[in-house]
Amino acid sequence: AANLVDCLSALKYLVYEGNLDRTMFMEQLRGNWPDETFRSWVANHCPHYGNDDETADYLADKWVRKFKNYLDGRKNARNGNYTVGLYTVSSHIPMGANVGASCDGRRAGEPLADGGVSPKAGCDEKGPTAVLKSVSAIPSRLCANGTLLNMKFSQSMFKRPGNLDRFTDLLRAFIRLGIHHVQFNVVDRQELLEILE
């Protein structure tokens, strides 16, 4: 969902509200972003999902509703109804390997955003509360097959005074915002390196 929303956001910001030439934009996508300066600018300066951004969050809500409406009434191979599920579990890497360059500055073959409703790595710049606000913009009640939000914290964060209380407040916000699922990962680089040895 994050990649799609960021793509729609970039198109809205650059093409439909901006004055970017559509032909040039398409050439960048077909060529897998040959102009690194432009790719980097798109990837870093367009509004991103996960930052409590009104435009990006509106597009997330709108897309999920359209997707749900598209699936309604369609039958699967077992003659059952399709239901919306927004999760990749750990498939974001192999799935990304089969997706071409995208409007959000992602190159062909690069991983997609993990989770399902998690922001793209490095794009959630306004903190975990802003992430929760963006995720709450998605009408998860329409996603009967589930949603998956991954949030990562360092172990050192929990050792700083007051941060455990802040984390508790974050959990309360998660509940108040009506988000269906969150998975927390608390690791540090050194611990992961030691596991690999």
Image: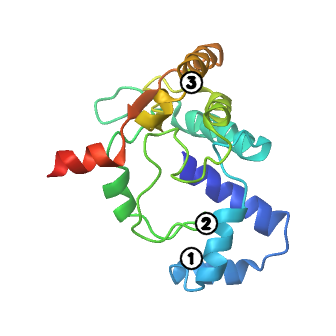
Q: Position of residue 41 (x, y in %)?
A: 68, 72
Percent across and percent down for residue 168 are: 55, 16
Label 2: element kind: loop
Q: Which residue is mark 1?
A: 29
Residue in the picture at 65% in, 41% down: 60
Question: Can see residue 86?
Answer: no
Residue at numbered disc 2: 103
**First of labels 2, 1 by sequence position:** 1
The answer to whether residue 92 is left or right of residue 26 is: left
Report the amino acid beneath label 3.
Pro
Seen in the picture, residue 113 relative to 127 is either above or below; the reply is below
Q: Secondary structure at mark 3?
A: loop
Amino acid on which disc 2 is placed = Cys
Q: Which residue is mark 3?
A: 161
Q: Which one is in front, 21 or 48?
A: 48
Q: Quadrant of residue 183?
A: top left
The image quadrant of residue 95 is bottom left
Assess disc 1: are there few (<14), some (14-19) or many (≥20) residues with their C-alpha within 10 Å of its C-alpha: many
Left or right, 195 with reference to 172: left
Give the CA separation, mark 3 to mark 1. Answer: 47 Å
Mark whose residue sits in front, 3 or 2: 3
Q: Position of residue 13 (x, y in %)?
A: 78, 61
CB under 8 Å between discs 2 and 1: yes
